[in-house]
Image (cartoon, rainbow, N blue to C red):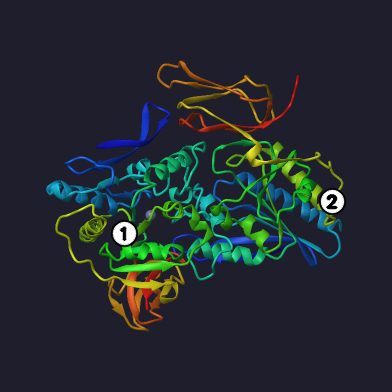
Amino acid sequence: MEEKLLFELDSVYRDNMRIKGFSFGKGEKSVCIVGATRGNEVQQVYICSQLIKIFRYLEKQGKIKENKSIMVVPTVNSYSMNIAKRFWSTDNTDINRMFPGYNLGETTQRIAAGVFENVNDYEYGIQFTSFYMQGSFIPHVRMMKTGFENVELAKDFGLPYVFRREARPYDTTTLNYNWQLWETKAFSLYTNATDTIDVASAREAINAVLSFLNKNEIIEYRCHQGYVSQFIEGHTLVNVKSNVSGIFIRYKDVNSRVKKGDILAEIIDPYTGMPVDTVKSPVNGIVFFHADQPVIYSQAPLYRIIPTDDLY
Amino acid sequence: MIQTIASVGLPIDETLMINKNRLIPQSGLNGNEKRISIVTGTHGDELEGQYVCFELQRRIKENYSSLKGIVDVYPALNPLGIDSITRGIPAFDLDMNRIFPGSENGSMPEYIASKIIGDLSGSDVVIDIHASNIFLKEIPQVRINELSRDVLVPYAKLINVDYIWIHSSATVLESTLAYSLNSIGTPTLVVEMGVGMRITKNYGDQLVDGIFTLMKELGIWSGETVTPKTPIISEDGEVSFINAGSSGVFLPSVEHWKNVKKGDCIGKILNPLTGEVNETIFSQTDGIVFTLREYPIVSEGSLIARILA
Ligand SMILES: [Zn+2]
């Protein structure tokens, strides 16, 4: 294992911020794994720390293939995590909206540039990231339609789903998008925790990465090969929302199979306790995402369902 | 007439409302009037536009018979942000100016964004007033995406600002309010002036003078107006950026909107722990300082000044 200082930010009031990469194996830059870009992504840091532990062991055992190297960057934003903020400590900008960065620009542009110049020439790029809304997903590989994305390769992670959606203007400054522009095959992995550590879900993500690296001949590692991933396009999911606000009592978890008309949630009046809305599934399907805030706004997206033809 | 253009129920006994006030001629409408829309408060920490909204209406009401068209005033596109001193949309931590044109079926911010676009579209001109942020002070200026320069520069010249900055287009900016409106044929000027969390009254007065000049040109106003300032017009290549090379406390040694010469000291970055000067910052060019750091604490990369050559 080699520990590398990728970028250091000086500070007058705090210890310097150090962004570190941990690399394993020698030769060809095969895969780079990036964890937290935001201060609340603790699950992402945990997953990377476990991967570092495993790669260290595999390296000693000689199980990283010849002429292959792996780098893990657990976090690019320790400053925000250390003060319990999601975005950048001073100006609240999002480092994952600053790529490819600019080394003469603003602080977070410089951080992004410092990171990107160290991670942009790998064959594969894997990012653990989180969604802007509070909620849980079925673990999946998420991709944007950029023209460079490779759905078949994404299935090598063996996660239940490979999810693709249209790229929007603000996506063009994410790490994933810029990796793809620089011809790295990039994947974002979503698990169902961010602010908390969910060991079972982390294990699934770790297994997915190891299985992917094994299938692509970067490491030698026997493990569960995962599932036959199902490919879904974002626009085919059915969104379920409530027209009223209130206390959100949720009845279904991710991965639940639901039938048309099943009760997914109730919205309760916060003063009287009376149900003001019963949220029902408009289709047969599988719960892909659910919100998990205790109280909700009207119009808030509560569930996303993968429609199925289930007859029983 | 106050109208609510979008509303969303909040969890406990509160409704979020995006309100506008519509002023129309005393004689009523004949259907052929031009319409100008003044919008502000997308970023909850930018308050310069609040005074403009007030002062514009105060002057119209003082001379109501000169109003010949429709004036729509939207003081708070992000009212929860303004009320809670939050730049983005509270609870979502989302920059509202990165979600346009929004979507009717999306989450609360996207839903509101789509309602705002729907209501503003069809205006003859929209003026979207921003106030930099808490970190930087800006001279009254209009920023124009090069894609819409032909349409917008003539309007921008009327509104009595000091400076028009024509910048290159970037994909990420396609989700701003102004881009969305300009792309559907509703001409929208972005004004930047002053500094976040403060009101600079003379800048507000200057812009209100200019809005009346533009309204007169559009046939919305028949009263007296000023002759607008002739703004400096520039493109990206003429703007030089100065960023901090180290962290500490920035103390400027130049004044905002004053000329500097190449080699002049712009300011110093001080270290309060050691008593040392961490960095002395010099201008790389002759020019005028149109953006100047206002917030003293800086880290490596913080923008210190922009200078127009
Ligand atoms: Zn703004």
Mark 2 vs mark 1, CA separation in Å? 55 Å
Corner quadrant of residue B302: bottom left
Give the residue number, with chain letter if any, for mark 2.
A215
Seen at 28% across and 68% down, the residue is B162
Q: Quadrant of residue A288?
A: top right
Question: Is B121 placed above or below B225 here?
Answer: above
Q: Residues within 10 Å of mark 1 (few under 14, many from 20)?
A: many
How far from the left and from the top, in percent, is residue B249? 37, 66
The structure residue drawn at horizontal position 58% and vertical position 65%, both measured from the top left corner, is A113
Q: Nearer the viewer, residue B124 or A142?
A: B124
Residue displayed at 29% across by 74% down? B254
Is residue B80 shown to the viewer in this render? yes
Front-most of residues A92 and A16: A92
Q: Quadrant of ligand 1?
A: bottom left
Nearer to us in this view, B298 or A228: A228
Q: Is residue B134 left or right of residue A1?
A: left
Q: Is residue A59 above or below residue B230?
A: above
- Figure quadrant of the N terminus of chain A: bottom right
Residue B237 location in percent, x, y?
45, 75
Q: Amino acid at mark 2?
A: Lys
Return the mark for residue B53: none
**Residue B21 vertical placement versus B155 (above, below):** above
From the viewer's perspective, tell me whether residue B259 is left or right of residue A230: left
Dot 2 falls on a residue whose secondary structure is helix
Q: Report whether residue A78 is seen.
A: no
In the image, what residue occupies the spot 54% across and 40% down? A133
From the top left corner, tell me how far across and down residue A147 is, in percent: 69, 56
Q: Return the residue at label 1.
A: B195
Badge 2: how crowded within 10 Å, few (<14), some, or many (20+)?
Answer: some
The chain to which mark 2 is attached is A
